[in-house]
Image (cartoon, rainbow, N blue to C red):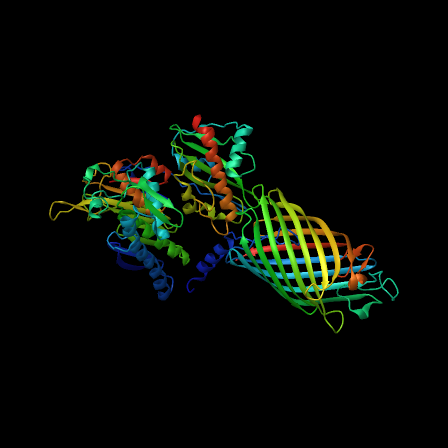
Amino acid sequence: MARRCQALLGTYVEVAIPDEYSDQYISEVINQAFKEIQLVEQLMSFHQPNSDLSRINRQAYEMDVRIHPYTYEVLVMARQLFDDTSGAFDCSIAPELQKWGLLPKTYELDMVDRGTLADLDFKVNHTISFRKPLCLDLGGIAKGYAVDRAVAALKEFGVLRAIVNAGGDMRVLGQCDEDIYIKHPLRPDQLMHMGKLSDGAIATSAIYYSKENSAYKNQSALVSPKTKQSILTNQSYSVIAKNCLIADGLTKALAIDQNVNAPYFEKYEAIGVIL
Amino acid sequence: MRGDKTIISCACLMALTTPVMAGEGSFGWLYSLDLQPKGTLEFEQKVDLTKGQAAGTYDLWKTKTGLEYGVTNDFQLTGYLNGYSVNANKNYTNCGADPSPCTGGFGVPEAANGHAFNKTQFEGMSVEGVWRVTNPVLSPVGVGLYTELTKGKFADALEARLLLQSNFLDDRLVFAVNVVAEMEKYKFAGTTPSKESMVDVLYGATYRFAPKWFAGVEGRFHNDFTGYNFDTHTQRANFIGPNLHYAEKDWWVTAAWRYQIGGQCFGDGAGECSDGKVWDSHGKNQFIVKVGVPFK
Amino acid sequence: MRWIPNPLVANLVSGFALTMAAIPVVAHAKVYLSVDQAKKMMFGTADMQHRPVVLNQAIQERMRQASSVSHPFESNRIWKSPNGGWFIVDEVVGKHEMITYALGINPDGSIKQVEILEYRESYGFEVANPSWRQQFVGKKVNAPLKLNQDIENISGATLSSKHLTDGVKRLMVMHDLVLRNL
């Protein structure tokens, strides 16, 4: 396989396609895949003031905001995941609301009716508005979506087999039974062989124990939407699903509900694994 | 695209098997406001036969082979290659001073009036544009404008239509009216081309009586004039008949027949009539078969 | 998707093994989902109770007036979920053949989802796109549910979009008049 790697999405993203093509073609194809990832990153960046996400966080409570179809699609799925997991997946962040100035300063924080993903209004022409003040962070599922879009770009080029891996969010294209390894939660330098995957995705959320300063180092911030507390466990949560967006979203729900037999797994035809 | 040929041909195959859309002609001669969606192409073949005049034989075959393209969802452009074939033999009884019956009618030069006349040839080309102003699926009345420019060895023509269509019963019942105005320059008759103009009203209805099948009626109220500017009224005639339309996923076909109820000639055009019917380019019966194959 | 778990590790973890049912594509009809698949997608493992109804002329007439759908509604493909949600299968006229679709309604009367089950046309298939169908989610019977009002048209698929939108409106009216009182 021919592999290329770029620093994107806050991690290293690797795209691998069979090396039977010419070097030029490989470069062209993989570049397109990286371009898609860059686009998703730009659209859903929490920090860039001009990203779709920043625009809706700033403005969508006051007015309708028109966004890129990709962002719209991610929000649609975020809402669907929110509904299907009964709120275990919820990418809205409450404490940031004051920072964004959406709460009038005369109000106490806990007197204000903060919103959840249920307060997203979807309108025509890829337009969004919030019914209540909301601050969204798409960090978790945006990575999975970027991986999916990269795979879509590869498919458009006629590539039949590929692997896109964004720091643990991975998608396999092709019936190739790719071997999948997950870090051992207590010994992150060891890998465990979980199984073989074809035409699917796997995503993992975990807090890995850092030996250096004997403190828990968050690999992904797991915050329970209901309790607003950080989740501090020494387990890793993985989900295998047909695409990376779903896998990503469901890992968050799995970390909250801690139940691999939750009904939403069957509904999405996904598999949850807790190590 | 460079790269492995097998993979690329697989990608191409997928594009071909993706379902495409079509602007279908559910009527024989009436134009509806069902247009080719944006960016799609359709192949169309029409064969039109006008048959039978006062006596003897008269067959006028007209073929149009065309490619229809949706420039936008509401504007469609079509290019045609046209052919015709005339087979006439002693088909007129209104021969004036000449012995009757004589050979005449549309497509027959004056020199041929004593004997049979046959001619088949590639005629020329047409370009046609249809602009849908309102969509009958969304509005009570769909309105469109149509124009066709034809250049041929036989005749040149410029035709314009006002298209009207209303749909009922979940769009299974379609009513349509076309108001047609045309200017024609006939070049077959002699050395001097003759100029004619025409105003027609086409009207009809078609109904989806079963999945994939439509059936209906269509009629034509026809008027001819001398000159390009409707100078003198020369003929009037009425036609009516049934139509049938069948559509599969990858192609469709329409067949229609109209029968001349009757007609009259006036002034300079008097020679074209007999037995209460109009001849010239019209016959006792007219048939059309159209086939469309959408592709991209 | 195909997932073959490592048997050694599988003993340590428990997971939900579900074989991915292949969606059959028939030559001249695209079958997107079976009724059962759609039911499961919308209501999961809930025990759905088959609840056909009989609609009198007056109700059918009101449904027709509200939606302009003229062909009669076949009322035997209705299911109720234990908490008061509803799953209805209906057909609307496509250009040449019928489009079969399913509507899920939440206990509060809002639309849960619209799924296309069978689409036999070669045109207008964009109505199966999730982003188009998402427009319906959350709407209640008082929403216009009308093409070019609150539902965006798919240019080039106007007929299918219109009929599906009208179909959904009709089912919402039926739910409002009949189902929610059952």
- Up the image or down, B253 lies above or below A116; here it is below
Residue C130 is situated, as x and y percent measured from the top left of the image, at 41, 45
- Up the image or down, C102 lies above or below B40; here it is above
Report the residue that reaches farthest toward the left.
A213
Question: Is residue C9 in sight in this rendering?
Answer: no
Total marks placed:
0
In the image shown, does B165 or A201 lie closer to the viewer?
B165
Residue A163 is situated, as x and y percent measured from the top left of the image, at 33, 53
Residue B80, quarter of the rendered image = bottom right
In the image shown, does C148 or B229 lie closer to the viewer?
B229
In the image shown, does A37 or B64 lie closer to the viewer?
B64
Q: Residue at x 49, y 32 (%)?
A: C77
Question: Is residue C132 in sight in this rendering?
Answer: yes
Identify the image quadrant of the N terminus of chain A: bottom left
Report the residue that reaches farthest toward the top.
C182
Horizontally, is A26 left or right of C51 in the view? Answer: left
Horizontally, is C120 left or right of A24 in the view? Answer: right
Residue B140 is situated, as x and y percent measured from the top left of the image, at 56, 46
Identify the image quadrant of the C terminus of chain A: top left
Residue B286, quarter of the rendered image = bottom right
In the image shown, does C30 or A194 lie closer to the viewer?
C30
Q: Residue at x 36, y 37 (%)?
A: A266
Residue B173, quarter of the rendered image = top right
Report the residue that reaches farthest toward the bottom.
B191
Residue B247 is situated, as x and y percent measured from the top left of the image, at 60, 49
